[in-house]
Image (tube, rainbow, N blue to C red):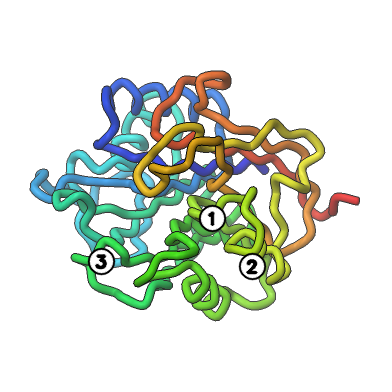
Amino acid sequence: MKLLTLNTHSLIEENYPAKLREFVKMIAAEMPDIIALQEVNQSMDSSTVDTAILSGYWPCTDTVIREDNHVYNMVRLLAEAGVSYRWTWLPVKIGYGRYDEGLALLSLHPILETDTATVSRTDDYTDWRTRKIVGIRTEKKPDEWFYSVHYSWWNDSAEPFEPQWQKTLSHLKKNAGIWLMGDFNNPAEVRGEGYDLVQASGWRDSYTEAFVKDDGITVNHRIAGWEDHKDGIRIDQMWHSHPVSVTRSFVICSGAWYPVVSDHFGVMVEYNEGCENV
C-alpha cells in the first residue's frame, strides 16, 4: 500500500494553476492508494457543481461542491489523464475570510464508508480555530480506516493540541487498524509536546519505523503559524495504530522529488500488510 499526505495551501499558492497540474502529474505517476489532503479550499462565491454528476464523489456530509474546489479539479484532471480516484471532502471552516477550507481523502479503490468528527472545543464554521477529522474505509482495506487530520499547535491558548488529541482518541473506531495522516502542527523534533503525547498514546510513527527514509523535513522556511521557526521541521506525519511493515517514507513535492506545489512538502509512505517491522 502507498499513502500520501499533503497540506495543499490550495488556491492561495502563487502560480496555483501550474502547481495543481504538477501535483496531478505526480499523482498519475505514483498512483498512491490513499491520499490525505489538508487546506483543501474552494471560493465561497464560486459557482456550484451538480453533485449528481461528480465522478467518484462519496459525500461525507451534506455540502456544496463549487467549481474551483481543489480536490474536484484534481479528480477532473486525473480523469483526463486516464486515472480514476474516489474521493470525499469535508468543509471545516471559513479560511482567509473567503474560502470554504476543508479536508479531503482520495482512494484508488471503492469507498465503503466515511466518518467525521469535530475535535476542537468550538464547532463554529466562522471560527478559524475549528478542527475536524475525516476518515474512509475502502474495499481494498475494509479493516482499516484512513483519516485526514489538521490539528492546532501545542500551545494555542484557545484551542491547544492536547484536548483535540484526546477527543480524537475517544472518537476513533475500536478494534480497527487506523492511519492518521496530515498536518499535526507539532514538530517531531520537539520533546515534551504533541509528538511525544501521540507516541505515549501507543501510536507508531511511520517515519521512524521505515526501513528506508530521508530527512523527513516537510517545512523548511517560515510559513503561517511558524513565522519564528528558522530550521526545518517535520510537522506532516503519518501515525498508525496497528503493526505493519513500513518499507519507505519519503518527502515528496520538495523540489528534489517532484516540483514544489505548496508551502508544505508532502509525505509518501509505503507499507506491507500483515507484518511488522522488527
Q: Residue furthest bottom?
A: 170
**Quadrant hosting residue 232:** top right
Q: Is residue 209 left or right of residue 175?
A: right
- Is residue 23 at all visible to an observer of this figure? yes
Q: Residue furthest right?
A: 278
Residue 170 percent across, percent down from the top left: 55, 80
Residue 81 percent across, percent down from the top left: 41, 23
Helix, strand or loop under label 2: helix
Q: Which residue is drawn at 77% across and 42% down?
A: 210
Separation of disc 1 and disc 3 at Cα?
A: 31 Å
For badge 3, the amino acid type reads: Asp
Foreground mark, 1 or 3, reads 1
Q: Name the residue under label 3.
A: 62
**Quadrant hosting residue 252:** top right
Residue 5 percent across, percent down from the top left: 52, 43
Q: In this view, does 50 lie above or below 231?
A: below
Residue 78 percent across, percent down from the top left: 39, 30
For badge 2, the amino acid type reads: Leu
Q: Is residue 228 above or below residue 74?
A: below
Separation of disc 1 and disc 2 at Cα?
A: 10 Å
Helix, strand or loop under label 1: loop
Classify 10 Å Cα crowding around label 2: few (below 14), some (14-19), many (20 and above): some
Q: Name the residue under label 1.
A: 186
Q: In this view, does 52 lie to the left or right of 71?
A: left
Q: What numbered label is drawn on residue 197? A: 2
> Circles 1 and 2: CB distance less than 8 Å?
yes
Q: Residue at x 59, y 63 (%)?
A: 193
Q: Residue at x 43, y 46 (%)?
A: 37
Q: Which comes sooner in the sequence, label 1 or label 2?
A: 1
Separation of disc 2 and disc 3 at Cα?
A: 34 Å
